[in-house]
Image (spheres, coloured by chain):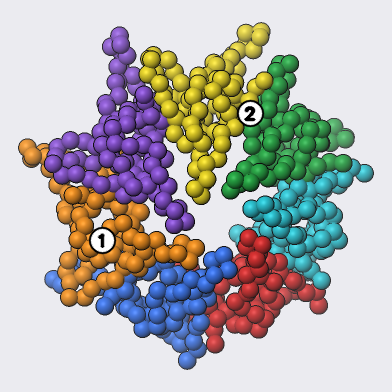
Chain colours: A green, B cyan, C red, D blue, E yellow, F orange, G purple
């Protein structure tokens, strides 16, 4: 499989599809407020360089993360959909 | 229960619903000026890194806070609604 | 009474209503130019942190201040209206 | 008379009304290009703080200054109109 | 052949045309989300200078890279189409 | 004559009217691309202060300069039209 | 001939007209994507000053350069058309 090494503070994320239905089966329409989604970090970049100093990443390969609905750029690798986003687009780590 | 560790200077907040009625029962419409809301900090991130130095957080787990009406991103955890926002979106601590 | 501790360089202000009439009783309509208003600082934050250094506040509890008409966020505490704004929104101190 | 102490690098200015007529009495309409106006500095702030260092003001009480037409915020003190603006809105000193 | 030496942190990229059809032959319309594309770095600049310090490039000649659909400026050299883009427009390296 | 001392990195410029006709007398309409104009520096400010350090001016009194068509603010002094602009609006010195 | 000394990191460029026809004579319409153009650096400024340090120029008099279609400001000198642009508008050097 082709693999991607993200640059700077970017991460490659395999998204978990957000459920668009409530438990009772009602479809939830998009609202003005962006809904976060979950995903798994497949590959993490080396970190951003600021004034010549590398800033360590706060997430690593395997972390399950939350991110905003419109974060990142879609990438298709071997027929699967991934997202590449900056660490600043990640809201938190699920544990 | 799944738990979230917010990144950088973000906090996970359990909101207290703002009352949309006056004491006499009149419904208050939204106005141009954003109304702040209250919530409780459920989890706080480690703090923002600026030029390689970590800036300590000013709020901690358990603090009751005020924030602007459209601050943060909604997150659903185990069926409950939370908000993830940056510390800079927090107006003050209620004591 | 519940009290608010503003974060960073924010202040909690009890506004003095701007008069919307001239002395002869003519009502003044809003104009394009924002009219400042007066208020009293009820509580001041600890000051902004810039590059790890805390910048002292220039206003303190009790100061009567001038600020632009659309500055700050409205907060209701125990039925009274307050404003939370950043020090940079304050134009000057009335003495 | 109530007096104002401007904060940061702001100044309190008593404006000199710009003439809206040519010497031959023709009224000049507003154009796209903003016309500067003159005023006198009534009170000057202590100066802006940048990275913990106070930057001295370049104007002082009594200076006659030029500024752009839409600069500053109008303030009414004891029935007279003043402007509060930042030093960066001042174009030059008239001498 | 004329050759280009990109300035600062820019790279000269020979793009690989993105497929606009699925394997079953259905044409994919443009969507709101920008699709990344692949290309090969033909020439890399010396790196950006920040506060007098040169920041080394993270990509080099020959790297196969991913970038957003609207990144860079098209350049025609000897009848072939290239792109010149900044390193910050590169999402990752394909390996 | 009243004289102006520009603040910071501003200059007072006496503009040379750009010719709006070609040599054969055809009037040139405004185009999307801004046409530069010429002028003479009548007075130069002391220079901008950046992080407490004064940056010397690159132009001086008497220099003939080029600047973009919509640069600066018009000032009328003793019936003559001048411009006050920042040094960053000056494209080059004519020699 | 009048000569121009560009200020800061600007360069004076004599443009080479981009061909608007293909080799077979078909006229190419403007597209959304800006087409770069070629030119020769006629005069280069001394370089930008950042925090009191002069940053050396990466291009010099005589360099043939590529730049975006809408970069720079047109200047007419002795009846010839030139462009004044910042070094950051230059994409690369043709060699």
* Disc 1: CA contacts within 10 A as few (<14), some (14-19) or many (>=20): some
In the rendered image, residue F24, in percent from the top left (x then y), is placed at: 7, 37
Question: Is residue G86 depicted above or below A72 in this figure?
Answer: below
Q: How many marks?
A: 2
Res B79 seen here = no
Parent chain of label 1:
F
Give the distance between the C-alpha atoms of the residues marked 1 and 2, in whole angstroms. 48 Å
- Say whether residue F29 is left or right of residue A47: left
Q: Which residue is mark 1?
A: F60
Q: Quadrant of residue G1?
A: top left
Q: Residue at x 40, y 44 (%)?
A: G56
Vertical placement of residue C77 versus E79, above or below: below
Secondary structure under badge 2? Answer: strand
Depth check: give the residue in front, E4 or A20. E4
Q: Does D89 sit left or right of G81 as displayed?
A: right
Residues at marks 1 and 2, common chain?
no
């Amino acid at each position: 499989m082709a693999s991607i090494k993200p640059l700077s503070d970017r991460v490659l994320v395999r998204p978990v599809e957000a459920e668009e239905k409530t438990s009772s089966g009602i479809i939830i329409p998009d609202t003005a407020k962006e809904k976060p989604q979950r995903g798994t970090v497949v590959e993490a970049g080396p970190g951003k360089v600021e004034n010549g100093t590398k800033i360590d990443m706060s997430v690593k390969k395997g972390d399950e993360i939350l991110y905003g609905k419109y974060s990142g750029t879609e990438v298709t690798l071997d027929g699967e959909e991934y997202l590449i986003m900056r660490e600043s687009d990640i809201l938190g780590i699920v544990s």
